Amino acid sequence: MIIAIDGPAGSGKSTVAKTVAEKLNFRYIDTGSMYRSVAWKSLQKNTAFRDEDAVADIASKVKIELIPGKDGQLVFVDGKNITDQLKVEEISRGAAIVAAQPMIRDIMTTQQRKLGQQGKVVIDGRDIGTVVFPQADKKFFLDADPKERGRRRFIELKGKGQSGSTDLPTIIKQIIQRDHEDRSRKIAPLKQAKDAILIDTTHLSVDQVVEKIIQIITPSS
Ligand code: C5P
């Protein structure tokens, strides 16, 4: 069984997907962290995010491991735990830039299909229900008001001590900008699959969203 959860940044999809996976005893795959890992490695190698050939070379060679941890998924790149370095703005921007390039998407999509084919997965991203697994058993699209999404991202970064001098209005602006890029790119843009169930999470807690999804997947629970 494959459960696809797509949506924009701050819609709650990662936290929700991780919790749904825990409850069902499924594997959780956060595809955003794969694009972030490619951006991280490119930065390490001083490679421009827009240099498609060079970034594709990195993407095809880099070893990305997604390992379930106590507080969520751990991300190892070439054997190094970089989980805490992935949410900073430079990497968010970089991930959106590399993710808009066809060669990189091809490599990532192939890897994601391999991971998902093992079955019993909850996989989240932007194009899971539309491109990576159009035949997923259940598809959800999470969305929320941009102000609320910015507030969540701000709290997340602050909690990790990574908000720096960036204030809430700036984070909201960055989120709106990234949404625009993700929705308007030519290849695999962020959009709700026709058969995905839309959940507006603006006024819902993580538990409420998880509950809704579990009810839909296993109506008898
Ligand atoms: O989900 P997250 O915010 O970590 O994703 C970072 C970026 O990676 C997104 O803004 C998007 O550009 C890209 N992404 C994508 N397709 C996915 C997952 C993420 O294009 N399946």
Image (cartoon, helix red, strand yellow):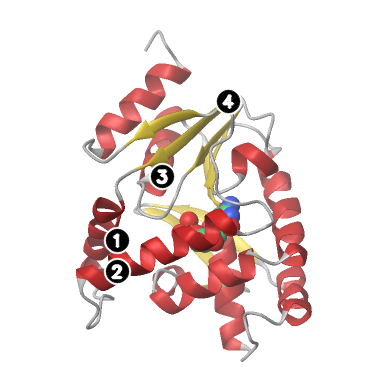
Q: Is mark 3 within 8 Å of ligand 1?
A: yes
Mark 2 closeness class: few <14, some 14–19, many ≥20 residues within 10 Å: many
- Residue identified by numbered label 1: 153
User: Which comes before the other along the chain, label 1 or label 4?
Assistant: 1
Q: Disc 1 versus disc 4: distance between alpha carbons?
A: 28 Å
Taking depth in this image into account, of 145 and 41 the one nearest to the observer is 145
Query: x, y percentage for residue 136?
Result: 64, 30
- Residue at 35% x, 46% y is 12
Mark 1 closeness class: few <14, some 14–19, many ≥20 residues within 10 Å: many
- Residue identified by numbered label 4: 195
- Residue at 24% x, 65% y is 154
Q: Disc 3 versus disc 2: distance between alpha carbons?
A: 18 Å
- Residue at 26% x, 34% y is 207
Q: Classify mark 1: helix, strand or loop.
A: helix
Task: Tell me where residue 47 sits by quadrant.
Answer: bottom right
In the rendered image, the vertical position of residue 89 relative to residue 24, given as above or below: below
User: Which comes before the other along the chain, label 4 or label 2?
Assistant: 2
- Residue identified by numbered label 3: 13
Q: Amino acid at mark 2?
A: Ile
Q: Amino acid at mark 3?
A: Lys
Residue extending farthest top = 220
Q: Amino acid at mark 1?
A: Arg
Q: Classify mark 3: helix, strand or loop.
A: helix
Q: Classify mark 4: helix, strand or loop.
A: loop
In the rendered image, the vertical position of residue 5 relative to residue 75, given as above or below: above
Task: Tell me where residue 139 sits by quadrant.
Answer: top right
Query: Do tag 2 and tag 1 residues touch (Cβ < 8 Å)?
Result: yes
User: Which comes before the other along the chain, label 3 or label 1?
Assistant: 3
Q: Classify mark 2: helix, strand or loop.
A: helix
User: Which comes before the other along the chain, label 3 or label 4?
Assistant: 3
Mark 3 closeness class: few <14, some 14–19, many ≥20 residues within 10 Å: many
